[in-house]
Image: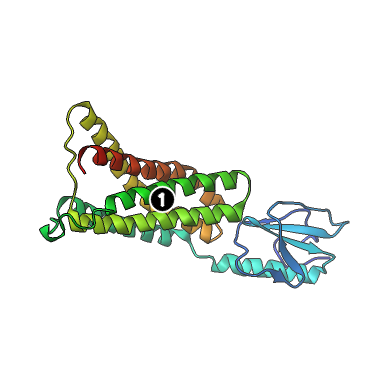
């Protein structure tokens, strides 16, 4: 039994792995989306599980014609797959513009005196959102270590929501009140400035990394997602925790 399909020209293969996303379909003929592990059986026992990205398709007692149609669909999906390079490039450009705006807000913009003494809860809100983000990140790490992918996804989206809310609150706070000067001296000031500098530098690095990591996950590129997430996670967590630490320093010496 043969076909023009490049994967099955010699009949039923013993194993297949396709580096593409399963996208939105849950059934193809009688191929059903199931577990995320690989299990292959021989042509003598025509039960087959097909690895597609991080998903698996399961076929049992299928005709070879149906399987060939499935392979044709995979080829079409590969041909229409969008290259990640333009998207990652756009993320880097957008992140650069966002960072430039924040640096202008911090070091060039002068806040109006009309808002002095008003909305003073914003720094505490920023610290709270940073803390919640750190907790969500740690919970997400726990879930993925225990292979609870849906819970991991929810936790990471929640962490992203907390970071997004923090960014909005941070912009509003600095637009209204400007930058806060740390009044401490000596070793305490050195320690504070060291933490602040690392926080700012890594937050600049974290923004495009977080967006790129989410892009790879949401588009089904899980191998690339895992590869970059091992760097994104500690940087994102450090930025969130040091955001709280900076607030504690300012609370003790400036507010």
- Tell me if 58 is positioned left or right of 80 in this view: right
Could you say which quadrant of the image residue 92 lies in?
bottom left
Residue 67, horizontal then vertical, whole percent: 76, 67
Residue 47, horizontal then vertical, whole percent: 82, 59
Identify the residue position indicated by label 1 in the image.
Answer: 209
| Residue 228 in sight in this render | no
Q: Nearer the viewer, residue 68 or 190?
A: 190
- Tell me if 22 is positioned left or right of 221 in this view: right
Coloration of the structure image = rainbow
- Tell me if 99 is positioned left or right of 154 in this view: left
Q: Nearer the viewer, residue 185 or 195?
A: 185
Q: Nearer the viewer, residue 223 or 117?
A: 117
Residue 68's place in the image compared with 215, above or below, is below
Residue 31, horizontal then vertical, whole percent: 75, 67
Could you say which quadrant of the image residue 52 lies in?
bottom right
Q: How many marks?
A: 1
Q: Most extreme residue toward the right, as rendered? A: 44
Residue in the picture at 38% in, 51% down = 129
Q: Most extreme residue toward the left, as rendered? A: 113
Check the picture and name the quadrant holding the C terminus: top left
Residue in the picture at 60% in, 67% down = 77
- Tell me if 128 is positioned left or right of 172 in this view: right
């Amino acid at each position: 039994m043969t076909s023009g399909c490049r994967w099955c020209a010699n009949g039923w293969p013993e194993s297949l792995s396709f580096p593409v996303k399963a996208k939105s379909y849950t059934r193809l003929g009688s191929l059903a989306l199931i577990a995320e592990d690989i299990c292959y059986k021989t042509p003598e026992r025509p039960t087959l599980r097909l690895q597609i990205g991080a998903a698996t398709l399961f076929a049992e007692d299928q005709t070879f014609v149906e399987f060939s149609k499935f392979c044709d669909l995979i080829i079409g999906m590969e041909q229409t797959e969008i290259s990640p390079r333009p998207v990652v490039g756009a993320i880097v450009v957008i992140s650069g513009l966002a960072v430039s705006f924040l640096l202008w807000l911090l070091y060039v913009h002068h806040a109006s005196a009309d808002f002095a003494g008003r909305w003073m809860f914003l720094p505490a809100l920023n610290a709270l959102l940073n803390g919640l983000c750190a907790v969500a990140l740690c919970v997400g790490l726990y879930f993925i270590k225990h292979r609870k992918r849906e819970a991991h996804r929810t936790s990471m989206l929640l962490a992203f929501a907390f970071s997004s809310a923090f960014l909005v609150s941070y912009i509003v706070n600095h637009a209204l009140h400007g930058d806060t000067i740390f009044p401490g001296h000596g070793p305490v000031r050195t320690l504070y400035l060291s933490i602040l500098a690392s926080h700012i530098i890594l937050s600049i690095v974290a923004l495009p990394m977080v967006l790129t990591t989410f892009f790879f996950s949401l588009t089904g590129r899980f191998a690339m997602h895992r590869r970059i997430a091992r760097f994104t996670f500690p940087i994102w967590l450090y930025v969130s925790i040091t955001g709280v630490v900076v607030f504690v320093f300012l609370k003790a010496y400036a507010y």
